Amino acid sequence: MTDEALVIKRAQEGDLKAFEELVVKYKKLVYNMCFRMLKDRYDAEDGTQEAFIKIYRGLRAYNGRSKFSTWALKITSNMCIDLIRKRKIQTVPIEDYNIKDDSSPEKHFIDSETKKDINKAVNELPEKYRTVIIYYHFMNLSYAEISDILGEPMSIVKNRIYRARLMLKNKFSERKGGYYELRGSV
Amino acid sequence: MNCEAAYELMMKCIDNEIDCDEKWLLEKHLDSCPDCSLEFKSLRETVKLLDEVEMEEAPEGIEKKVISRIMQEDEMKAQNKERIMKVAACFALILGWFEIAYAFMYASVLNLAAGYFRVFIHSTDRFENILMEIWYAAISLSAKLISLGRIAELVINDFTNMYGTVIFAGALLVFAGLYMLNSVRKMVRR
């Protein structure tokens, strides 16, 4: 049994310390999914807490067949969809995404202006394309994981990501004109 | 290779899922097709930009908040359970009291009868008096035994009574339903 499987087993038996370890490990993923879906920092923080409570309550149902992260994200995604339906959360585009971190410029290769552009372009995509781009490129999930979370076949997920990339490419070339040429060769 | 197939390979290449043969095919196509070549270049740039967007850090101390909320919820659940148990206990106590009073009713009636019997047939004969005392003791003891038996019966049978009632009611409903169905069927036949 791996370390994580052991921690999960302890959490399943009601060990809150073990569950806290899991929260620490996966909070970034869960928070980012909430933030991307709910499009608001406060809602995302609330949503993250809510999602982890749901995960804790449903922990006994986790059987280890999929990765824990995939299982947890599936719960988070369903919860966010419920929240959006229930509270009718206003979906205003996130313009200030990641700007908070701009104090450490050496970590970032792109300026905030470009970041805003990327976020704007991604947010303008139709919902189903937006979601897969966020999962694949921003959250670094694999095709298999996305297909598991969304409950769609992998071929459809792949196709959706391909189409979304094309849409974004067209948007960027429209918006920035010669932007790509300025950035040098590929 | 046509542009459609090249597009598929471009995506594979971007995802690092392309093998050597496919890469060779793609390069060959890109060399001969300037449109696809430009498309591929800007596509790669787009994906590169997307991949550079980093994930946000989760808010500080969120794990502590989650754990304290879980503990709060658990506490509230335990309190609710306790409350329900208290109400149920009160209810059971009241019901139980009625049952016990009912059971002891027999005993007190018998005791009373035995007492009166002793008072009314009071003899000067000592032997008769002793007989009477034995008689009184026998009656009151049996009365106590009867009431104890009655309580035990109540406790044991409460469960069976409950299920019995449910089964009886169920049977009655099924009977009534079948009867009605049958009469409806008769009416339709006519």
Image (tube, rainbow, N blue to C red):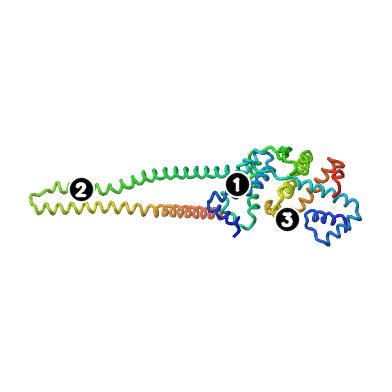
Three-letter code, disc 3: Met
Question: Which of the two residues, B137 or A140, is positioned nearer the viewer here?
Answer: A140
The Cα atoms of the two marked residues, 1 and 2, are separated by 71 Å
Q: Position of residue B168 (x, y in %)?
A: 43, 54
The Cα atoms of the two marked residues, 1 and 3, are separated by 27 Å
Q: Residue at coordinates 72% horizontally, 54% vertically from top-left?
A: A143
Chain to which the residue tagged by mark 1 belongs: A
Q: Nearer the viewer, mark 3 or mark 2?
A: 3
Q: Position of residue A66 (x, y in %)?
A: 64, 56
Q: Which residue is mark 3?
A: A154
Q: Is residue A97 visible?
A: no
Chain to which the residue tagged by mark 2 belongs: B
Chain to which the residue tagged by mark 3 belongs: A
Q: Using residue B128 as the reference point, say whether residue A175 is left or right of it.
A: right
Question: Which of the two residues, A146 or B130, is positioned nearer the viewer here?
Answer: A146
Crowdedness of circle 1 by 10 Å Cα count: few (<14), some, many (20+)?
many
- Indicate the quadrant where residue A122 lies: top right
Q: Nearer the viewer, mark 1 or mark 3?
A: 1
Task: Say which mark, if any, is on residue B113.
Answer: 2
User: Are dots 3 and 2 in contact, CB under 8 Å?
Assistant: no
Q: Position of residue B35 (x, y in %)?
A: 89, 50
Q: Using residue B121 as the reference point, say whether residue B96 is left or right of it.
A: right
Q: Which residue is mark 1?
A: A52
Q: Are marks 1 and 2 on the same chain?
A: no
